[in-house]
Amino acid sequence: MSAFVGSISTAIVRRADRYVEMLDEARLDGRMRVAEPGLLDRFERYAADVLDRYIPPGPRNRDSLVFADLYNQAALAPAEDGEHSTIAALLAAEVEVRGPLRLTPAQTLRLAEILERLGHRFARADLPLHAAFSFDRAGGLFLQVENHLARDRCLLAAHRARHRARGRGVRKILETISNLLCGYGYQPYRLLAWAFVQLTALILILTIFFGVSLITSVHMALTNYLNPLGFGDVDGLPDGAWALLIVESYAGAVSLSVFFALLVRRWFRL
């Protein structure tokens, strides 16, 4: 390690020391959920402070990351010291991403993988906003190397982390529904599973509660899901069965429209 990298690493570690102290104070006061956004603001200021000092004397080694030692320490740190090394690694990664030295595609990919692992460590430490921050940074780097599947994975993890941090309310309920139905849009194939659940439920209800034969129930449910049945197709059915078929036709139209919209977005990266 060069003297320059050593001095910057020392500056990062010292700021990580102070940052962990603030995290411990917030936990002891029982106000971590309220304090976490402000702590992230402080983290950004610490990163800016280090970046002001980060004026490399020459080009980096083409095959390595500048703060590889800090990343390795975070990966190998024991449980009792994990939070400090994780904060130091995140601060180092932020400095390296925003610093003046350009990353090669291989270095970008490695740094993205490191940030993704840090995100999972923050999630396990019950620091959801820090996890979301790490996942967002990882997703941005994966995009630079055109690894779209990894980017989607990180952005989905970031959404779920922010959802954990959100207080109760209508927005959290809507986000929960979005996550269950399609993984915030990053898992469109989940909608096919929900379509299967809708069809199965309707078939069982028509057969068990309205006395429709199984074959007729299957035919009506499958047909109505894609193309609403007309009056002539449902003659003799009780009013309750009509209402269920109407609900199913609207649910099918909405589900399929959303499914194909998300699928096109995923295929063509709109």
Image: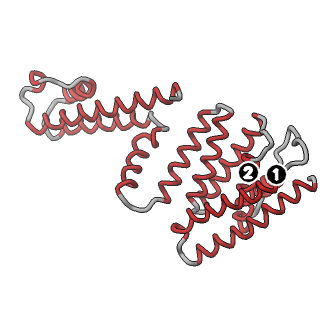
* The residue positioned farthest toward the bottom in the image shown: 29
Q: Quadrant of residue 193?
A: top left
Within 10 Å of disc 2 (Cα), the crowding (few <14, some 14-19, many 20+) is many
Query: Could you say whether the residue bearing mark 2 is in a helix, strand or loop?
Result: helix
Residue 86 lies left or right of residue 37; in this view the side is right
**Vertical placement of 40 versus 160: above or below?**
below
The reply to whether the C-beta atoms of the residues labelled 1 and 2 are less than 8 Å apart is yes
Image mark for residue 57: none
Can residue 151 be spotted in the picture?
yes
Residue that numbered label 2 is attached to:
93
Residue 89: give x, y in percent of width and height: 74, 56
Residue that numbered label 1 is attached to:
67
Task: State the residue at coordinates (59%, 73%).
Answer: 26
Q: Which amino acid does label 1 sit on?
A: Phe
Residue 158: give x, y in percent of width and height: 55, 49
Along the polypeptide, which appears first: circle 1 or circle 2?
A: 1
